[in-house]
Image (cartoon, helix red, strand yellow):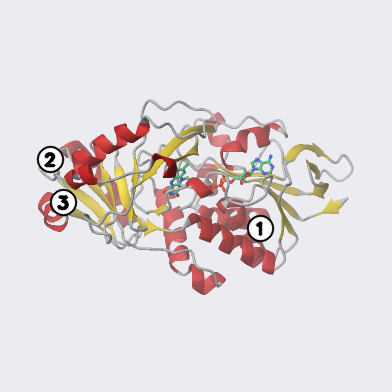
Amino acid sequence: MHTADVVLIGGGIVGSSVAYHLVAAGCKNVLVLERETTQGKGSTGKSMGGVRAQFSTPVNIQMSLYSIPFYASFEERLGYPCDYRPQGYLFCATSEKHMSYLRSNYEKQIAMGLKNVRLVAGDEIRGQFPLLRGDDIVGGSFCSTDGFVDPYSAMNGFMTWASDHGATLWKNADVTGMSRNIHDGGFEVRSTRETVSTRTVVNCAGPWADPVAKMVGIDLPIEPLRRMLVPTEPFDQFPHTAPMIIDMSNGFHFRPESRGFLLAWNDPEETPGYKADFDAGFIEKILTRAADRVPVFENVAVNPKRAWAGLYEMTPDHHPILGESREVPGFFFANGFSGHGVMHAPATGKILSDLILTGKTDLIDATLLNFSRFAEGRMIHETAVL
Ligand SMILES: Cc1cc2nc3c(=O)[nH]c(=O)nc-3n(C[C@H](O)[C@H](O)[C@H](O)COP(=O)(O)OP(=O)(O)OC[C@H]3O[C@@H](n4cnc5c(N)ncnc54)[C@H](O)[C@@H]3O)c2cc1C
């Protein structure tokens, strides 16, 4: 039977980053099992590619403080590009309640050591972006090292580096079940390619994390939730140097992409489920919000055929589940990123690699994000979810 020191289930950006960090730390016999014929068909290939440190909880800020500098030096470290563009994230508050929320987040971010974040006045936003409808904007917060990456390139960079240095990626390897080996306490991982024997399994299955966890008898509180994105046709009436701009009155946000813009809005009426189809009715809903905040978007053209849908992997407290299962020793989670899996993939890879190889990590207090927090009533709620 094929053997590996560590088996990763799922070859999206998270599995790829865990593979990279394990190999870089000297653990070379790593096998990644990906059920698709190519990588990136899960959430990674559907992502908006936003990276930010402007979060409301210290642990999420810490994950970004590792991940964003990592993306900034990605090509230097790995030899492959990830197309990090530090154009910033600008949160625009339209009420005093939102402004005081941003102020309290800002204080936490500064306390954690984030350097490039600042609060901005409404007049500054109106001066800098006269094409935004700014009459109701009371202020905002901006971080210049936030920005965008190309998730697909980052995933490929991680996995190519890992493969070049010892890891193995099997595509068309759908994991269908797992059993414990009664002789050595390890796992037999059954896949459509081959069965693999290992002592350590990492669940990197994105929105399919719960079905994979069920193979070892664990129910994960992770629900798939559809998110839809609408790219515009080429459009030059708004500056392409713009950051990700978030209208806090309704959650509409957008960023430059190629010669046009990528428009996003999370429909509060969306319900959980494995829904991967794009709903054409969404176009009108999002364009209404787009034109309300950016009146020149009334002239923007969109081709519904280029719009897409993907799945967020939501946990009840909007934080990931990281680390080893107490119930099934040797089975690790890297799941439930609640819309932040691209930006937090570098930190996740480092944390998982540390925990697998040494049993501890300095990057975060890993007990905060373990699976036991749900049973023990220790949820920590992230509210800055887009
Ligand atoms: C529309 C949209 C916009 C987003 N925008 C952002 C953003 O701006 N910034 C950000 O940080 N995040 C964003 N996200 C979230 C981000 O894309 C995800 O959190 C991230 O891609 C998760 O990566 P992953 O590797 O865990 O999952 P995935 O990319 O889904 O990879 C999981 C892999 O596991 C494989 N798999 C599943 N089951 C099995 C099995 N049984 N056997 C073998 N393989 C299996 C799948 O085929 C898949 O390739 C967005 C998501 C969506 C949908």
| Rendered-image quarter of ligand 1 | top right
Label 3 neighbour load within 10 Å: few <14, some 14-19, many 20+ = some
Mark 3 lies within 8 Å of ligand 1 (Cβ measured): no
Q: Position of residue 295 (x, y in %)?
A: 17, 44
Q: Which residue corresponds to mark 3?
A: 131
Depth check, front residue: 214 or 82: 82
Label at residue 207? none
Q: Position of residue 301 (x, y in %)?
A: 29, 45
**Kind of residue at disc 3:** Leu
Amino acid found under the numbered disc labelled 1 = Thr
Distance from mark 1 CB to nearest ligand 1 atom below 8 Å: no
In primary-sequence order, the first of circles 2 and 3 is 3
Secondary structure at badge 2 equals loop
Q: Is residue 288 left or right of residue 14?
A: left
Q: Which mark is residue 136?
A: 2
Left or right: 75 with respect to 214? left
Q: 142 left or right of 370?
A: left
The answer to whether 246 is drawn above or below residue 82 in the figure is above
Foreground disc of the pair 1, 2: 2
**Residue 233 in view (yes/no):** yes
Query: Which residue type does callout 2 highlight?
Result: Asp
Could you tell me which residue is drawn at 64 percent across and 58 percent down?
A: 19
Front residue of 359 and 178: 178
| Vertical arrangement, residue 327 with respect to residue 19, above or below | above
Mark whose residue sits in front, 2 or 3: 3
Label 2 Cα crowd, 10 Å radius (few <14 / some 14-19 / many 20+): few
Is 263 above or below relative to 89? above
The residue under label 1 is 358
State yes or no: Cβ of the residue under disc 2 lies below 8 Å from any atom of ligand 1. no
Between marks 1 and 2, how big is the CA–CA gap?
A: 52 Å
